Amino acid sequence: MRHDPITHRVTRTLVTALGERDEGTRAHCERVVALADLLGRSCGLDGRDLRVLHSAACLHDIGKLGIPDHVLHNPGPLDAESWATMRTHPERGQRILASLGVSRADSVGLAIRHHHEQFDGQGYPDRLAGEAIPVVSRIIAMADTYDAIATRRVYRDAQPHHSTMATMEQERGVKLDPWLFDRFARLIERSPLRAM
């Protein structure tokens, strides 16, 4: 088995597959990439970590390929069983990355696995807390949260920037790394990625 770096072609292939399954998730991942890259560069991540961040942000929801349609495309709140199924997507994503057999796949897969951990240790799948959560995963969580609130979902309208940031402020130190939140809050105010 070859052990080449995760190439742009491999990433684009997986993103295309995700888009064929769910165009909304693909578009969300592209926005998360832009936000995560902005924050990662601001934090001074080195070149290797920036490459892992970019790939992991691009593919953070790739595990949703394995989520059944009745859960993935549910237009309303998920029941307990469906929510439990949805919460398996980070682990599914890590397994998909592991199957590539290329370098950095382990690092990217680990970042994907932990992008729903919470700073207070109440996230999933492993209930990691604080700096035990890989920094790349904490950055993706920030970008993922911002985009999830600021864009329209089938069950609710998009929230304006000020409402999005107010919600995220409440999650500072609970779901979100407080240091990263403060840095993100400053960056997003003057970024073209800022929601209306």
Image: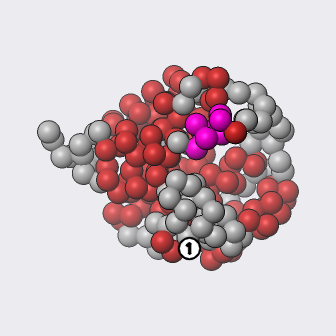
Which residue is pictured at 58% across the width and 49% down the height? 32
Which residue is pictured at 38% across the width and 70% down the height? 46
Which residue is pictured at 83% across the width and 48% down the height? 159
- Image location (x, y in percent) of residue 83: 66, 39
- Up/down of 188 relative to 147, above or below: below
Q: How many residues crowd mark 1 within 10 Å: few (<14), some (14–19), many (20+)?
A: some
Q: Is residue 167 left or right of residue 50?
A: right
Q: Which residues are magenta?
A: 81-87
Q: Residue furthest front?
A: 81
Element type at mark 1:
helix
- Residue 85 visible (yes or no): yes
Q: Is residue 188 left or right of residue 86?
A: right
- Image location (x, y in percent) of residue 2: 15, 41
Q: Nearer the viewer, residue 182 or 186?
A: 182
Circle 1: residue type: Gly
Q: Is residue 146 left or right of residue 3?
A: right
Q: Nearer the viewer, residue 110 or 122?
A: 122
- Image location (x, y in percent) of residue 22: 58, 27
- Up/down of 146 relative to 82, above or below: below
The dominant secondary structure in magenta is helix
Which residue is pictured at 69% across the width and 54% down the height? 146
- Residue that numbered label 1 is attached to: 130
- Up/down of 123 relative to 80, above or below: below
What is the count of numbered marks? Answer: 1
- Up/down of 154 relative to 117, above or below: above
- Residue 37 visible (yes or no): no
The colour scheme of the drawn protein is secondary structure
Quadrant in the picture for residue 178? bottom right
Q: Residue furthest left?
A: 1
Q: Is residue 127 magenta?
A: no
